[in-house]
Amino acid sequence: MNTIYVKVKDAGDAAIGEAGRMIRSGGLVAFPTETVYGLGGNALDPASSKKIYEAKGRPSDNPLIVHIADTADLEQIAESVPPAAYVLAKKFWPGPLTMIFHKKPSVPYETTGGLDTVAVRFPSHPIAQALIKASGTFIAAPSANVSGRPSPTSGEHVLSDMDGRIDMIIDSGPCEIGLESTIIDMTEEIPVILRPGYVSEQMLRDAVGDVGRDPAVFDEDTTARPKAPGMRYRHYAPKGSLAIVSGDRDKVISYIRRQTEERPAGEGKRYGVITCTQDAGMYPLADFVADAGSLEDENEIASRLYDLLRRCDEEKIDVIFSEEFDTPRMGSAIMNRLIRAAGHNIIKL
């Protein structure tokens, strides 16, 4: 397949109309959102959703998120929308929040991973909104990467993974947030967070009161059927082995530094470290030091995380150690992605 790659600066570009026609006719288009790049197909067409799974190499029981361009569209795809959902929509839509509802029959099981629920998001990125409108339908879109790999936050990331697999890539530059949306299940009596993101637990509580958190947010559960993307399978992973080192900061630095300095003789492996700006100078013998940014700027850390995981691949790093990033608001989201990228490989000191 010949993948069309276009750079688009604004929502009025003619390429968006062409991309909309592609989606309407069953094609796949990668497009920017404020979180990460999405791989879009017609959410109401079972064949299109099957193509998404095939292009990504994604397990078919891992649900897709349906993207809409108007809150009023929610009624067309979701049943029994609770009042709290409209409170959240008014406060956080358009934006990086996905809500789960009981689905209407019009949404095929191929889109929902076989579930009777549907995940819905209204993105704030103007090009994403324009594409949804141009398609004349709703767009099912997971992240536009090969399943299990770090999510793409630039058009170049998408091209690296999806060239020859999909019809078109719309590149509008780097994503602002850089981590996937928060997912909250609105089908429970008390809304439950299934995936942390930019919209924090406290922000949700401030809006609607009590909310729960699914144990699978940080704990490994290989038996439960995933109700939302990113809950069961290893995600966001670099090619090298990744371990998170947890504990007192000085002990963490000492442990990682020792690993980079006392390597087995003749091993021949390249070692990398994911660290904050404050600690970046502490690992002089590492082959690659990935500076995620200052601990005082958690938005920067979040936006750079996936790019750094991909940089580790570019630098051919075999063994990666990461510090923890326990920042006040985005820390849960950052660590959720790191833990899954590491396959729950955590070294506790």
Image: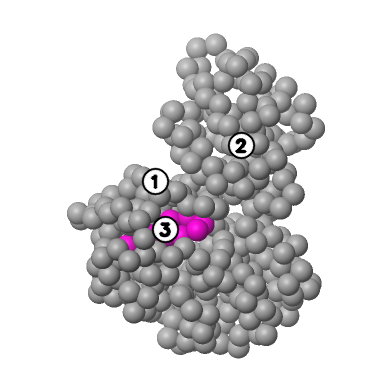
For badge 3, the amino acid type reads: Pro
For mark 2, what is the residue?
293
Q: Mark 1 or mark 3: name the one nearer the start of the chain.
A: 3
Q: Closest to the observer: 66 or 220?
A: 66
Please name the residue that numbered disc 1 is placed on.
157
Q: Residue at x 36, y 60 (%)?
A: 10
* Residue 50 coordinates in the image, percent (x, y): 35, 68
At 65% from the left and 72% from the top, the residue drawn is 91
Residue 264 belongs to the span the image colors magenta: no
Q: Nearer the viewer, mark 1 or mark 2?
A: 2
Q: Tell me, yes or no, whether the highlighted magenta stretch contains residue 30.
A: yes
The earlier-in-sequence mark between 2 and 3 is: 3
Mark 2 neighbour class, 10 Å CA radius: few under 14, some 14 to 19, many 20 or more: many
Identify whether 322 is placed above or below 76.
above
> CB under 8 Å between callouts 2 and 3?
no
State left or right for residue 273 relative to residue 251: left
| Quarter residue 133 falls in | bottom left
**246 lies left or right of 111:** right
Label 2's element? loop
| Range covered by the magenta-colored residues | 27-38
Which numbered disc covers residue 32? 3
